[in-house]
Image (cartoon, coloured by chain):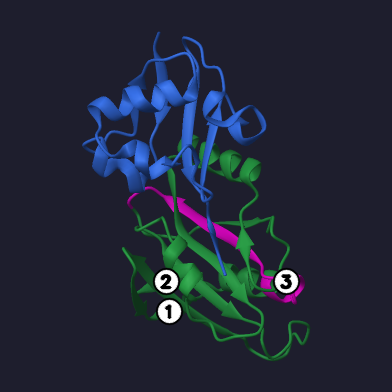
Chain colours: A blue, B green
């Protein structure tokens, strides 16, 4: 199963500059593990322990995964995962 | 150096005044690789706070999709400080995740609603925790 994962500028150091990479898995967590196996370090930039980092947003088919089960969110062939760092500050 | 046209400069300042005492935030997008901020996009501060800002996550996704379609980048990311100077806070530095952007700060600490007073507006690069101030030149288009 192939899922397209869109990578933000700040994480492209892990993908050799690629804006999007391919991943496989039945859940968001599995897809991130799979992507990390080829693009080492990217998972840690998105996941903190067992959950998503507070200031990183992840969307599956435009849905914010915070409302769809986080890392357990189901993904299917042809889905698009978008990773976007929060734009935030004090 | 950051070059801003007068209209964009005025729009950023007006947004900061309007949302005072809460922080205002947004971007000025421009053609990828051009370093020219041309399209002013005010964003909703999901935190609605005088001490914090965060682009609303759904609006953030829409913005980035729109910029991708138009082959644009966030050339400027702006926000206001409503009680302190226009200089990046420790939180601003820790959370800055667009190394290519000009981070513009506006201070409304002297009050947001007096349209006659000019506000402090400064621009910075924030890369890997390093803050570098840069000159802002306002040009009449």
* Rendering quarter of residue A30: top left
Q: Both on one chain, marks 3 and 1?
A: yes
Image: A25 above or below B30: above
Q: Position of residue A78 (x, y in %)?
A: 47, 12
Which residue is most to the left?
A16
Q: Which mark is residue B22?
A: 3
* Rendering quarter of residue B135: bottom left
Asked if the residues shown at circle 1 and circle 2 are in contact, with their CB atoms under 8 angstroms apart, the answer is yes
Local crowd at mark 1 within 10 Å, few (<14), some, or many (≥20)? few
Which structural element holds mark 3?
loop
Local crowd at mark 2 within 10 Å, few (<14), some, or many (≥20)? some
Instruction: State the residue at coordinates (42%, 15%).
Output: A25
Q: Position of residue A14 (x, y in %)?
A: 25, 39
Q: Position of residue B55 (x, y in %)?
A: 61, 54
Instruction: State the residue at coordinates (58%, 78%).
Output: B106
Image: A78 above or below B16: above
Quadrant of the rendering where the N terminus of chain A is positioned: top left
Q: Position of residue B139 (x, y in %)?
A: 47, 75
Q: Which mark is residue B137?
A: 1
Q: Which mark is residue A69?
A: none
* Chain at numbered mark 1: B
* Chain at numbered mark 3: B
Q: Earlier in the sequence, mark 3 or mark 1?
A: 3
Image: B135 above or below B59: below
Quote the CA–CA distance across marks 3 and 1: 27 Å
Please tell me whether mark 3 or mark 2 is closer to you in this view.
3
Q: Earlier in the sequence, mark 3 or mark 2?
A: 2
Range of magenta residues: B16-33
Q: Earlier in the sequence, mark 1 or mark 2?
A: 2
Q: Which residue is mark 2?
A: B3
Quote the CA–CA distance across marks 1 and 2: 5 Å
Local crowd at mark 3 within 10 Å, few (<14), some, or many (≥20)? many
């Amino acid at each position: 199963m192939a899922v397209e994962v869109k990578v933000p500028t700040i994480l492209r150091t892990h993908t050799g500059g690629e804006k999007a990479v391919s991943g496989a898995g039945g859940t968001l967590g599995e897809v991130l593990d799979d992507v990390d196996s080829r693009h080492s370090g990217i998972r840690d930039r998105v996941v903190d322990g067992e959950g998503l980092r507070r200031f990183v947003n992840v969307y599956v088919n435009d849905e914010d995964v915070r409302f769809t089960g986080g890392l357990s969110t189901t993904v299917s062939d042809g889905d698009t995962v978008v990773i976007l760092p929060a734009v935030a500050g004090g | 150096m950051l070059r801003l046209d007068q209209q964009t400069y005025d729009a950023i300042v007006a947004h900061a005044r309007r949302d005072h005492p809460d922080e205002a935030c947004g971007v000025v997008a421009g053609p990828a690789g051009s370093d020219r901020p041309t399209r002013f996009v005010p964003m909703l501060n999901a935190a609605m706070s005088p001490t914090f800002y965060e682009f609303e996550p759904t609006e953030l996704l829409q913005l980035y999709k729109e910029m991708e379609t138009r082959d644009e980048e966030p050339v400027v990311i702006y926000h206001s400080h409503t009680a302190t100077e226009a200089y990046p806070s420790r939180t601003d530095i820790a959370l800055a995740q667009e190394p290519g952007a000009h981070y513009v700060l506006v201070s409304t600490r002297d009050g947001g609603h007096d349209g006659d007073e000019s506000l402090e507006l400064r621009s910075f690069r924030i890369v890997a925790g390093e803050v570098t101030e840069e000159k802002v030149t306002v040009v009449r288009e």
